[in-house]
Image: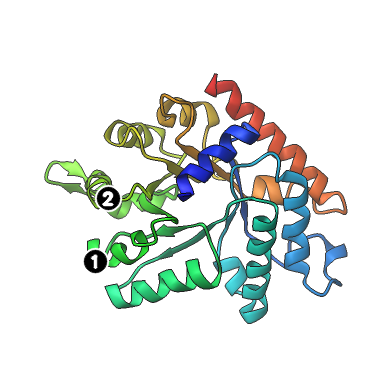
Amino acid sequence: MTFFKQLEQLQEKNNSLVCPGFDPDMDKIPKHLLGDEDPIFSFCKGIVDTTIDLVCAYKPNIAFFEAYGIKGLESLKKTIDYVHELDGLVIIDAKRNDIGNTAKMYAKSMFDNLGSDALTINPYMGSDSVKPFLEYKDKGIFVLARTSNPGGADFQNLICDGKPLYETVVKKVLEWDENGNAGLVTGATFPEELGAIRKMAPGTTFLVPGIGSQGGDVEKTLKAGLREDGKGLVIVSARGIIYASSGEDFAEAAREATIQLRDEINKYRK
């Protein structure tokens, strides 16, 4: 079964478009976990245990694991394996890309070795650098189109043939997506651009960062980006969920924050 089919099944099963982002920071995770053999895994596991029935996927940002060296990557692998034990999905946020031969090794690393179900991709180097990821037909990729950070406009909004560059990216991704396994990254912080991309790609699934601490608005995001079937969005919230509490109740607080976001999203889905 393809990634996007599994994703839609989980969205239906859990009635949720929420995707918690895992950005573990040893300076921020609850102090009582620091004595554990693997504090990062303990932290992620606790949140998975209390939210697995409320979400459609999890998005670990690989930088927050790589920062702790081999042990951090081991924590990431354990987290991915644990999510899979509970029949969940993982989207690694790594923004990988390079020339074809190198991209092939990146794909092997993310999909075969770490076991991720999907991956964020930087399209800057063009079709031959994206193709090795698309060849994993059962996996998903999310290509950066209009990102949530203000500086994204430095390049993404440059006018190319009378249109902003991010629209050219969207057009190219639709051309490359022969197997139906490509989505787009579109930030909640720019709902007008998100809406423009939805018009260009009515059936595509968007990974949407920027809700919560970055200031993205749930109502505007849903109105601009939802598909007609009430799906097509994976709404990411990292700090707002995983750091809802810094105490021993962190996992329970993460659950409450997830419920709150899920219910707010579903209000506008209706």
Q: How many marks?
A: 2
| Residue 249 left/right relative to 65 | right
Label at residue 128: 1
Comparing marks 1 and 2, which lies closer to the viewer?
2
Q: Position of residue 72 (x, y in %)?
A: 65, 74
Query: Image point 63% across, 59% down: which residue?
Result: 23
Q: Are marks 1 and 2 in contact (CB under 8 Å)?
A: no
| Residue 171 left/right relative to 16 | left
Pointer 1 or 2: first along the chain:
1
Q: Is residue 11 above or below residue 141?
A: above
The amino acid on which the numbered mark 1 sits, given as a three-letter code, is Asp
Query: Image point 83% across, 69% down: which residue?
Result: 34
Q: Position of residue 204 (x, y in %)?
A: 37, 39
The residue furthest left is: 161
The residue furthest top is: 270
Estimate how packed mark 2 is, as few (under 14), some (14 to 19) or many (20 or more) residues with alpha carbons within 10 Å.
few
Residue at label 2? Answer: 178
Foreground residue among 204 and 209: 204
Foreground residue among 138 and 83: 138
Query: Image point 72% across, 52% down: which residue?
Result: 48
Is residue 99 visible in the rendered image? The answer is no
Question: Can you say which quadrant of the picture contains the C terminus?
Answer: top right
The amino acid on which the numbered mark 2 sits, given as a three-letter code, is Glu
Whole-Å distance between the Cαs marked 1 and 2? Answer: 14 Å
Q: Quadrant of residue 126?
A: bottom left
Identify the secondary structure beneath mark 1: helix
Foreground residue among 136 and 266: 136
Estimate how packed mark 1 is, as few (under 14), some (14 to 19) or many (20 or more) residues with alpha carbons within 10 Å.
some
Q: Is residue 30 above or below residue 67?
A: above
Label at residue 173: none
| Residue 240 left/right relative to 62 | right
Q: Position of residue 79 (x, y in %)?
A: 67, 63
